[in-house]
Image: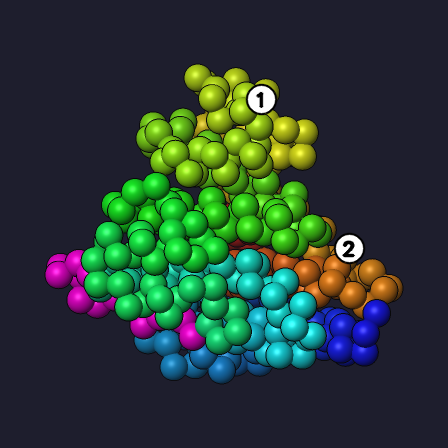
Amino acid sequence: MSAAWVAGAVRAKALVHRYPGADGAREVAACATLDDAFQLLAATPYSRYVRTAAGLPEAQRAVTATLLWHLRVLAGWLPRSGSRLLVPLAAGFEIANVTSRLLALDAHRPDAPAPYRLGALETAWRSLERAGTLAELRAALAASPWGDPGGDTPWALITGMRMAAARRTAGTVPPARHWAEGRAALLVARELFVYRRPLPIPVQHDATRLLGARATSAASYQEFRAGLTSTARWVVAEVAEPGGLWRAEAGWWERVQHDGALMLRDGRYGPRVVVGAVAVLSVDAWRVRAALESAARGGRPVEVFDALA
């Protein structure tokens, strides 16, 4: 293992130890006001961005901006192969940028958030940012590693990117393959059995490769669960009906946290440690975002927050 990988892994572990973790998020969730929550976060890495937030949406975005900043820092510590490993793991930020771009293209939504600054974690954002129409966005995606989403409606563009993110992660980040398959299963289950929308053809193809043809051609949610590959079935194993998919989502985050923590304890100081750090940092940001919403509502009992996060 190269010295750059060892140094990057050591720094990745150091980053994780600075974050508030589950106990810190519970304290934030119990706050009676957002201001109280901000004071608690002042002693955490989130303070850099959260301290200027004016309300809940800005504060939640500040939390994810902090995560992105530390992923960019981590990428800078790693050898080039390591920074490439992080690109699919940071795909959600580019999807968020495209969502903001879609809002900006809508004359009725001039208040679109500013795009995240992706740096070395960009896939194709500079091309996507220049797109002036939905058709141009689709063309830019099709010419990039994202691939053709299969349509140029806002729904098709974002759904295509989400499935492409799962495909790319499964194919290029082996320690994260099970997470990617679980994420793909949740996406397909919602589209087919909650929203009752057929998948765009490229999304269908990616989903079939990740989840198996029996799952993606299923006529019912029960058939879908039974048809999933053994490596993807875990995410819905305890959810008997589509209405319980929110619990599967929480279970997905719990699995990512568990696996990431195990990877961080890997003594070889290589890619698994780095992927584990990204996982734990991402879960922390997800928990803190949920905790901030709790504080904005006047604080919830800890048991309610634990059910969500």
Q: Secondary structure at mark 1?
A: helix
Asked whether residue 271 is drawn in magenta, I would say no
Can you identify the residue that label 2 sits on? 262
Percent coordinates x, y for residue 101 in the rendering? 28, 62
* Residue shown at 65% from the left, 43% from the top: 178
* Residue shown at 54% from the left, 21% from the top: 214
242 with respect to 133 (left or right): right
Front in this rendered view, residue 17 or 305: 17
Q: Quadrant of residue 81?
A: bottom right
Percent coordinates x, y for residue 270 in the rendering? 78, 65
How busy is the neighbourhood of tag 1: few (under 14 within 10 Å), some, or many (20 plus)?
some
The magenta stretch is 105-117
Rendered position, 227 above or below 74: above
Q: Quadrant of residue 93?
A: bottom left
Is residue 220 in sight in this rendering? Answer: yes
Front in this rendered view, residue 180 or 39: 180
Can you identify the residue that label 1 sits on? 227
Percent coordinates x, y for residue 182 in the rendering? 58, 40
Front in this rendered view, residue 108 or 137: 137
Asked whether residue 114 is drawn in magenta, I would say yes
Front in this rendered view, residue 93 or 157: 157
As drawn, the label of residue 285 is none
Percent coordinates x, y for residue 237 in the rendering? 62, 29
How busy is the neighbourhood of tag 2: few (under 14 within 10 Å), some, or many (20 plus)?
some
157 with respect to 83 (left or right): left
Q: Earlier in the sequence, mark 2 or mark 1?
A: 1
Amino acid marked by disc 1? Gly
The N terminus sits in image quarter: bottom right
| Residue sticking out furthest to the front | 143
